[in-house]
Amino acid sequence: MRPTLVIVGAGPRGTGLIERIAANAPELYDGSSLDIHLVDPYPPGGGRIWRQAQSPLLWMNSHAEDVTMFTDETVAMAGPVREGPTLHEWAGVQGRLFADRRTQGDYLSWVHEQAVAALPDTVTVHHHARRALRVEGAPEGRQRVWLDGRPRPLVADLVVLTLGHLDAELDEEQAALAAYADTHGLVHLPPDFTADSDLSALAAGESVLVRGFGLAFVDLMVLLTEGRGGRYDGDTYLPSGQEPVLYVGSRRGVPYHSKIGYDWTGERPPLPRFFGPEQVDALLARPAGFDFREDIWPLVEKELGFAHYHRLFHVHPGRTSVAWDVFEAKYAAAEGLAERTALVASAVPDPADRLDLTALDRPLRGVRYDSFEDLQDGLRAYIESDLTRRHDSDHSPDLAVFLGLLSVYNQLIRLGGIGSWWHGFFSYLASGPPGPRLRQLLALSRAGIVKFLGADTVVTAEDGVFRASSASVPGAVVQARALVEARLPEPTLGRARDGLLRALHADGADETPDGLLRVDPVDGRVLDRDGRPHPRRFALGPYTDARAPGAFTRPRTGGPAFRQNDATARVVLEFLRGPDRDGTT
């Protein structure tokens, strides 16, 4: 029987794995025949998220020049570097602009074609436009992958799951709200990929409560405004009359920070400095394990602070009161947040130049407004300030912190099981919307199409309607007959609609307390409940506890997903060429 690999998921992660298989094959594979079966109902390359069949109004949230599917010398991997064009270089999109998702889908399709073409002639790729239902087979034998509508399974030596983002069943609260909506004739749209949501039930002029202020909300905002015929005249929104009125709130009560709108210049902070491989090794060696808040977060705070102040002292020395070498030595020796805070206060005169991660995370904590109208004014001022800062290179320590966040994420992957809080915090600071989207949000706010609810938003269902309140305006309540959960489904095993993952869990695969699939952080092998790696099953992606910031990344930033793809590809090739490949079916 020909050696066979099944890859479930044909989006950017599956494509990245094939690219790494092609790159490593000359060194690790003996040239014998190999079948790769790629299973996904959506087109290879773009997959579901980047498919062509979606609105051309939807953008990427990264600059075109900051998107690549190709490795470079900064990726710490054993395999060879195979460089290639960024999205900007491939599509001819101007560097500081944001491509639409269809263009990104075209780029990913091209990358997929190039990766397949780079495989040895003896390797054949088969695409099955179906869903994978379950994987069966003993660890010591070949695996059987059952597909929807196919009477016989694919028989594989190895299976790699590169599923990407997942749909999920409703949690207890969402289910209760959905049931209330059904009973009282209301509209409840659960967490979803906004491009897939049926928004037709949100009527023109109707009040709609929206929970979630991240990228899913931005898509919702676009589809319900420009998508319904509205348009912008400079900073003014001209309604079509088909828009609902969106009342948006969240835990933080503010949108994700704008993408930074200037380029890096000069020396980069030497990262990692205080949270690198040495510290990760020490944490992994602890017999009793570690706690994120007590053991990891202090290291993360110090690392991000170092990135911030390295940039401030080197590029804006006039805003500091001591020499860098003096500050750096004291900063390195400082133990604990209080000691670092005192040091910074003595060396950085302006509080606006100091890094306060707590304030960044919860900017409305303790802030109260006298009226709903005052809250609108306050939030517009906050967003204007964020836009100004994120597009002003005088505040380039913010970009240094972004680089620090990427470095930290690179280290956290090795620890696994960090949980959803960190991923949300990272996305809020480093993966926010394009600046033009926030300018559109301001225009919609001034036009009365979007209204802000504030922080710690609470939604209840009573008296036949949904009601929303927040801590920002005590006593203010907004009611509506429609509620949209504007956020992605949580990628948990227990609530995944994907039957393949549920079956995997039932078959013994382990999960974290947050419901993520546990995998070996080195090569992505699926772990059982005793921590043993499955010899023939691998998983890569956001539903695992080794999830990376993204399947593609900013050039020359280490690309942890690329490193993972390379490690898995090498293990796969070594296994398939080895004497232990054969097993019983």
Image: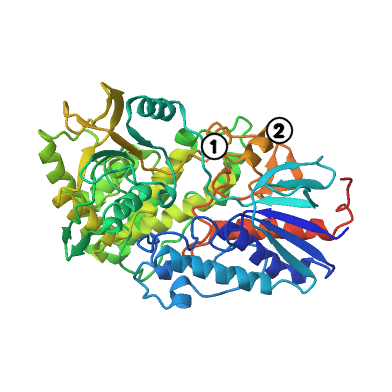
The structure residue drawn at horizontal position 13% and vertical position 36%, both measured from the top left corner, is 372
Q: Residue at x 56, y 45 (%)?
A: 280
Q: Quadrant of the N terminus?
A: bottom right
Task: Estimate the spatial distance between the alpha carbons at disc 2 and disc 1, rounded to whole Å.
Answer: 15 Å
Q: Quadrant of residue 264?
A: bottom left
Q: Position of residue 357 (x, y in %)?
A: 33, 44
Residue 107 appears at what percent x and percent y?
Answer: 51, 70
Name which quarter of the figure residue 173 lies in.
top left
Q: Is residue 314 left or right of residue 239?
A: right
- Using residue 41 as the reference point, say whether residue 343 is left or right of it: left
Locate the C terminus and report the quarter of the image it occupies: top right
Give the amino acid type for the residue marked by disc 1 in the picture: Thr
Q: Is residue 473 above or below residue 553?
A: above
Give 230 or 459, whichever is nearer the viewer.
Answer: 230
Task: Read off the residue under disc 2.
Answer: 508
For numbered disc 1, what is the local secondary structure?
loop
In the displayed structure, would residue 156 be above or below residue 482? Answer: below
**x%, y% of residue 80?**
66, 70
Q: Residue at x 83, y 70 (%)?
A: 31
Q: From where the camera sits, is residue 173 visible?
A: yes
Q: Residue 266 falls in which quadrant of the image? A: bottom left
Query: Mark 1 highlights which residue?
Result: 492
**SS at badge 2:** loop
In the image, 276 versus 579, the foreground residue is 579
Q: Which mark is residue 266?
A: none
